[in-house]
Amino acid sequence: MIPDLGRPLLFVNAAQVVTCAGPARARRGAEMRDAGVLTGAAVAVVDGRIAAVGPRDEVERRYASADQVDCGGGVLMPGLVDSHTHAIFGRPRAEEQEMRASGLDYMEIARRGGGIHSSVRDLRARSEDELVSMAVPRLQRLASHGTTTVEVKSGYGLTLEDEIKTLRVIARVSSIVQVRLVPTFLGAHEVPLEARATADGRKNYISLLVHEMIPRVAEQGLARFADVFCEPGVYTVAESREILGAARRAGLGIKLHADELRSSGGAELAAELGATSADHLGAISDDGIRALAGSETVATLLPGTLLFLGKDRQAPARALLDGGAAVALATDFNPGTSPTPNFPLILTLAVSQLRMSAAEAVLAATVNGAAALGLAGETGQVAPGFRADLALFDLEDVRELPYWYGDHRCRRTWVDGRHATG
Ligand SMILES: [Zn+2]
C-alpha cells in the first residue's frame, strides 16, 4: 500500500526555525556552536520530506498551493532523536527510589529483589498483548515532549523466548504510535540469575547469545542494533567483544553501555570495534576520551540517569566535546534509573550539569542522536531531502528549551510530514 503522505505543507509564522542544517553526519568541535537559527523563515514539506527552507515570501511563492501550518510565533525545529531507551517493561519500580534515598546501594536493592532482575521477573510473566498496551502510552508520552524517533532496547527478557517477545512488542508498538522506533537487541543487559547460580551458567548464557539469540534476532529482522552492558560485574570487555563480534557477523549494528559507574575500557572497546555509539560514560578514562575522539563512534550521554541515582558526578562532557568527540544526548528512559519521558529536561541537565551550550545540547539531541542510530542522512535536520520530522514548541527562542526546566512546551510534532502529536 502506498502511504498517504497528504498535501504539501507550508510552515509559517515561527519566531525561529532551528534547522541544525549541515553535513549528514555527527557534528563535533566548532560545528556544535551553531544550531542554524533562522527568523522570518518558512518550511515547505512535500511527500513527507523537507522540500525547502528559507525566507517566507520566497518559499511561499514557490509553494502557493500548499496547506499552511501556522506556527503561532513558536520555535519549529527537528523532532528530537532519543537514541537510548528501555521503554518496554512492566511494573514501574518506584519503591527503589526511596530505598536509595535511605542509603541502600545497588547490591543491597538487588538482594531485596529489586534492580534489573525484578523487571526481568515481571516482564517474563506478562503476555505480548499486555506489554504492548503498557508500552503504547509510555511512548506517546515521550513523543508528546517533542521526540519523533526513539531507539528501544530489549533486555528484560534474558531468555530466547522473552527477548524475541520483547522485540515483537517493539514491532507491534511501532505500527500503533506516531513516532519512529528503532529496535535494539540487548540480551546482554545482565547475566540472568539462573545463569549466575551455576558454575557454567555464565559461559552457557554467552554461548546462547552468540550462537542462538543473535542469529535468530538478525534472521527475523527484529533489531537493527545489538548492545552489551560492558561494566565490571556485568559483562567484561572480552565477553563484550565476543558478543558484539557475533552481532557484527550477523549484520547488526553495534552499541555499548560503557563505563557507566566504573571505568573498564568500554569506551576503548567501542572505538576499536567501530561501534555506532558508546553510551553512559559516567566514569570514562582519559584514554577512553582520546579513543572516542579519534573514532566515528558517537559518545551518548545520559545525564538523567546519574541525576535520578543521586550521584554527585556526571560524564565529562566538556572533555569529550573539547577533545573532538561526537556527543549525543538521550533520556535512557527505563523503570529503574531514568523514568523520565521528558527529553527537553535532559537538555536542561546538559546545559546546567554538563556545561554544554544550548546549541551543543540541541545538536546533540537531533543530528548527533540520529548519527547514534545510523540515521544522520534521514532525520535530525530541517533541510531539503530530510524526513519532515518536526517539533513545534511554545517558545520564542530555542535557548528557552533547556531554560523552562521540567515544563511541557511541545505543542505539536510531525513524523514524515504527518501530524503525530498535539
Ligand atoms: Zn541503558
Image (cartoon, rainbow, N blue to C red):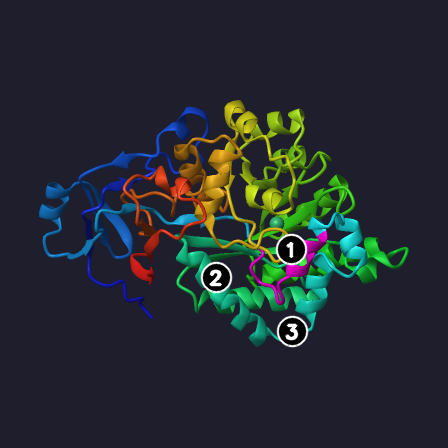
- Write the start and end of the magenta stretch as one range: 86-99
- Secondary element at tag 1: loop
Q: Earlier in the sequence, mark 1 or mark 3?
A: 3
Percent x, y for residue 401?
38, 42
Q: In the image, what residue occupies the spot 50% across and 63% down?
A: 138
Q: Are marks 2 and 3 in contact (CB under 8 Å)?
A: no
Percent x, y for residue 34?
35, 30
Q: What distance separates the C-alpha of mark 2 from that of mark 3?
A: 18 Å
The answer to whether residue 268 is left or right of residue 16 is: right
Q: In the image, what residue occupies the spot 47% across and 64% down?
A: 174
Q: What distance separates the C-alpha of mark 1 from that of mark 3?
A: 18 Å
Q: Dot 3 surroundings within 10 Å: few (below 14), some, or many (20 or more)?
A: some
In the figure, 101 relative to 34: above or below?
Answer: below
In the figure, 145 relative to 137: above or below?
Answer: above
Residue on which disc 3 sits = 126
Q: Dot 1 surroundings within 10 Å: few (below 14), some, or many (20 or more)?
A: many
Q: Nearer the viewer, residue 276 or 137?
A: 137
Q: Earlier in the sequence, mark 1 or mark 2?
A: 2
Q: Which mark is residue 139?
A: 2
In the figure, 230 relative to 223: above or below?
Answer: above
Residue on which disc 1 sits = 336
Q: Amino acid at mark 3?
A: Arg
Direction right: furthest residue: 199
Q: Would residue 95 be counted in the magenta stretch?
A: yes
Percent x, y for residue 27?
43, 32
